[in-house]
Image (cartoon, coloured by chain):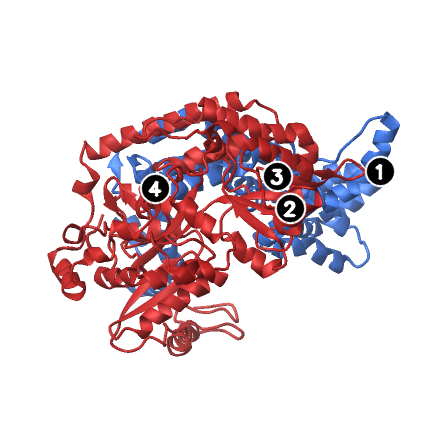
Chain colours: A blue, B red
Amino acid sequence: MSGLADSIPEPSARRPERNEWRAGLLFISPWLVGFVVFLLLPGAMTLFYSLTEYSVLEPPIFAGFENYAGLFRDPVFWKVLRNTLVYTAITVPVSTVVAIAIACLLNSGVRFSAFWRAVVFLPSLVPLVASAMVWMWIFNGEFGLLNAAIDPVLGVVGAVLGTDLLAPNWLGSPAWIMPSLILMSLWSIGNAVVIYLAALQDVPAALYEAAAIDGVRPLGRFRHVTLPMISPVVLFNVIVGMIAAWQVFAVPYVLLGAAGGPDRAGYFYTTYLYDNAFSYTRMGYASAMAWVQLVVILVLTGLTMLLSKRFVYYRGA
Amino acid sequence: MATRPGRAVSGGRAGVGEVSRRAALGGLGAAAVAYAVFGPRGARDVPPARVVIDYWEKWTGQEGRAMQSIVDEFNATQDRIFVRYFSMSTIEQKAMVSIAGGDPPDVLGLWSFATPTFAESAGLLAIDDLDASFGAEIAADFRSRYGDTRWVFEPERYTKPAWDFCRYKGLSWGAVSTCSSMALYYNRGLFREVGLDPDRPPRTIDEMDEAAERLTSFGGDGRVERAGFVHREPGWWDWIWGYFFGGTLLSDDGRRALAGSAENVRGFEWLQSYPERIGRTRLLAFQSGFGNYNSLQQPFLAGQVGMVLHGPFLANVIELFRPDLDYAAVPFPVEASIYDPAAPIALLEADTLCIPRGCKHPREAFEFVAFVQRGEILERLARAHAKPSPLAEVSESFVRTHSNRSIAMHNGLMGSPRAFVKPQTRVWPQYESEFIAGMGAMWDLRVGAGEELRGIEARAQVLLDDAAQRHERRYWGRTLAERRPRAGSGV
């Protein structure tokens, strides 16, 4: 009895705590309301709609798991799933490696580092649609900047090999659409670079000094000091990048238009989901796709977190 | 109670450099008051005591201005109604969401090919049966204003296709505002340059091939400098080519996909003959250099392409960027065996004015739609858009003063017995996307036309069967007439 009495605070002590609690709730209430109205409720509704046949204009009717079963029979679903997997599997590691490399360069005491930091970050500020339009012309098969740079090189190589080598038609040929989109994804790694840079600057200099005294070479220092120390940040960027790659939409939609270009080579999961919801008026089907997407992202994130136990080092843990 | 210096305590007092709770709330309150006092306002130019109706339309630029002037004219003649014109993109998606959300505009400007989707879902009011759609009270009001309201939407006033644009399963779901007939536009100057007679344009596919061959030229490095014809420019009708060989994509009852028919295969084999002849890589590279439709870099305006399948609205773009261009338009050539000068084959499309289910002011919306249906208004709109008139009879000045020099031909196409519209089925967007996806492989010569079209047909048939099953499951044989909405009704 005395233990229970001890655990209950005196009313006078509880009141300020309650006031703090109320004030806290009041201050975060805009976010709470937004979360409930724009995320939790719509999320719950999509779960319901995914079990119905719902065209938006007509009332939903219960269809059980028909939409989920339909996904497995839909060849376009498998196509966009494959495209999205390939895109994610390549862009995430490539952009991680490139972002870390650029961050290391910026952290190496290069002259005018503030200027270079701004240069690297600047593309992240350009609206997606605007940058997609710019890249459309960079990738242009006839007048594109990229092919203008490649053509002379191919001319020389072709002369040596005795064959006629042509620069790719980046957005017109199904084989080159995915490489084009992956290349373009590197355009906006500025955000990740800034985060890596902050992590690099947080690595204690004493560790490098100790490693240098022990005769560890620069590459070894990077592998045994830098990478472990920034590994939590790498994990964060990989997860965020993976989720973003799974949700890629605007750039392929602008660059390739409806159906993702020839052979649907640039048709992604979210684009097909959008088309089902708003062009094909199959909101129930699109809702089922959204839930499958959520499950896939959760599974991939969970796997990454599991793997991170082996590869991520937390200081002070 | 000990606190660290500068840390806010629970009572709301703040330390140095920190914002107190009271100050934060006060700041937020002040911002809210400032927003209420100085923030954005609704339209202030709405005259008092008017019923305001919202009209959503897809037109911008010159076309949008033309409609705005008609809206202004309507507003000027009114003491009761005021129309607000809103121009927007992706109007179908926005309309769908607004109707489902119960807050649609009063008038919607849709494309005619959206009619089946919206009508099948009972998203629009049927305007040719006032009592059933609007209710007895509003119908009586219309009659008191107009007498017999059928004068507004009499079939005899319109060309048959213009009347049919808004028809679906025996009912009218809107009224046409403008319409288009697609034709072959050709550059007369280039015809002269290569020794072709500009007054004798091609009529059959064979003649067209010959003209295209002569118009096509290559640079010293083998690159294409100019092409006679490129099927994928402007690339808006990837599915169309079989029609010029007598094909169609959907059976009359709308239940069977016909993409793989012999006529369609011939049409797409003809399409493939162009990359075969010119060289697929060279053609793709040439094509990737084409500029935007609404610019001087558009290939037909830039002289990169000698002939193009296009709508009458192209005349406005020519007038804007290349008024000196010597061009003409003729019915698109067809396979020699089906050539009939009295019955050209042409795709027809239209813009429609519809009244969505659940709109707030159906009677005022109807009044505006009826106003636009006046002969002189429709003609003025058509003239501004460089399009033919949807009316069966046009005034003498319409053709004489029209900005499109081939308007008489476009008007003629509207009356052709072999003119056609996009397949009227709810799954058309998916069916069309199959063509868009398959076109890449056919144009790139990676697959034969027959094989690809049979694949498209099989996939489209699955879509059609699936849609029919879903429809049956939902409505259990109830007809569209039995389940169409009334004004003010919800879902």
In the image, which disc is placed on residue A215? 1
Name the chain letter of the residue that bears numbered label 1: A
The picture places residue B36, in percent across and down from the top left corner, at 37, 75
Which three-letter amino acid code belongs to the residue tagged 3?
Phe
Residue at x 61%, y 39% (from the top left corner): B229
| Element class at badge 1 | loop
**Vertical relation: A148 (above or below) A310:** below
Name the chain letter of the residue that bears numbered label 3: B
Query: On the rendered image, what quadrant is the N terminus of chain B found in?
Result: bottom left
Front disc: 4 or 1: 4
Dot 4 corresponds to which residue?
Answer: A46
**Vertical relation: B486 (above or below) B71:** above
Name the chain letter of the residue that bears numbered label 2: B
What residue occupies the far right of the structure in this picture?
A160
**Which of these two is toward me, A258 or A21?**
A258
| Element class at badge 4 | helix
Residue at x 20%, y 48% (from the top left corner): B485
Which three-letter amino acid code belongs to the residue tagged 2?
Phe
Could you tell whether B55 is left or right of A88 in the image?
left
**Which of these two is toward me, B131 or B486?**
B131
Is disc 1 in contact with disc 3, using a CB cutoff of under 8 Å?
no
Which three-letter amino acid code belongs to the residue tagged 1?
Gly
Is disc 4 in contact with disc 3, using a CB cutoff of under 8 Å?
no
Dot 2 corresponds to which residue?
Answer: B290
Q: Earlier in the sequence, mark 2 or mark 3?
A: 3
Is disc 4 in contact with disc 2, using a CB cutoff of under 8 Å?
no
The picture places residue A242, in percent across and down from the top left corner, at 55, 39
Give the image quarter of residue B35.
Answer: bottom left
